[in-house]
Image (spheres, rainbow, N blue to C red):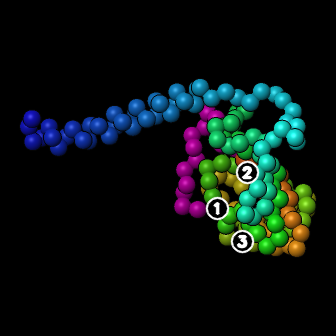
Amino acid sequence: MHDTMKKITPYLLIPIFSLLSAWVGWKAHEQQTDLASTIYKANQIEKVNEAWGDIQIYTPENGTGTYGTINTLTAVADIDAGQEIHPPHQHTAEEFMYILEGNGTWSLNGKEQPAEAGDLLYAKPWDWHGIKNTGDKPLKFFVVKWDNKGLPMPINQGK
């Protein structure tokens, strides 16, 4: 094999593997089944105990989707006093968090403010967000988080 061919071959493989990877990902996307219309009964959902509190997962985000979404999470979390699920974070998904009970501190794009029952947070893709229970009772919130089908994954633009 010529030296020139040895140098070019790896560069040819990169786009070939990229196209193959994209095709495999697209085919996997086509095989996902949307959630059926249903009623999720409280006694049938996944309940998980964590170090920070408890979470009741109605739809897990690992591939679950609806007609227009993928990786859709719906859950109710109870954060123990003085705890947080994780520090403020960011991701590709859009997310709503609604506080049902308790109080704490919201974090949104580096700014903190009080959080209380009845508050609703919306975080668009890549915005830094989180919540910490700074109260003396459990903080309970409902969360809906999803990526969109048919739209390219949003690019993190250095937020």
Query: What amino acid does circle 3 point to?
Result: Lys
Q: Residues within 10 Å of mark 2 (few under 14, many from 20)?
A: many
Residue 151, magenta (yes or no): yes
Question: Which residue is at a point 40% across and 33% down the rendered structure image?
Answer: 19
Which residue is pictured at 69% across the width and 49% down the height? 94
Looking at the image, residue 93 lies above or below residue 106: above
* Proximity of marks 1 and 2: CB atoms separated by less than 8 Å: no
Q: Which quarter shows the C terminus?
A: bottom right
Q: Which residue is mark 2?
A: 95
State the CA–CA distance, disc 1 to disc 2: 12 Å
Q: Is residue 152 above or below residue 95?
A: above
Q: Is residue 154 magenta?
A: yes
- Between the residue at mark 3 and the residue at mark 1, the CA separation in whole angstroms equals 13 Å
Dot 1 corresponds to which residue? 89
Question: For the image shown, how many numbered marks are present on the structure?
Answer: 3
Callout 1 amino acid: His
Label 1 element class: loop
- From the top left corner, tell me how far across and down residue 82 is, in percent: 79, 73
The magenta segment is 146-159
Q: Which residue is mark 3?
A: 111
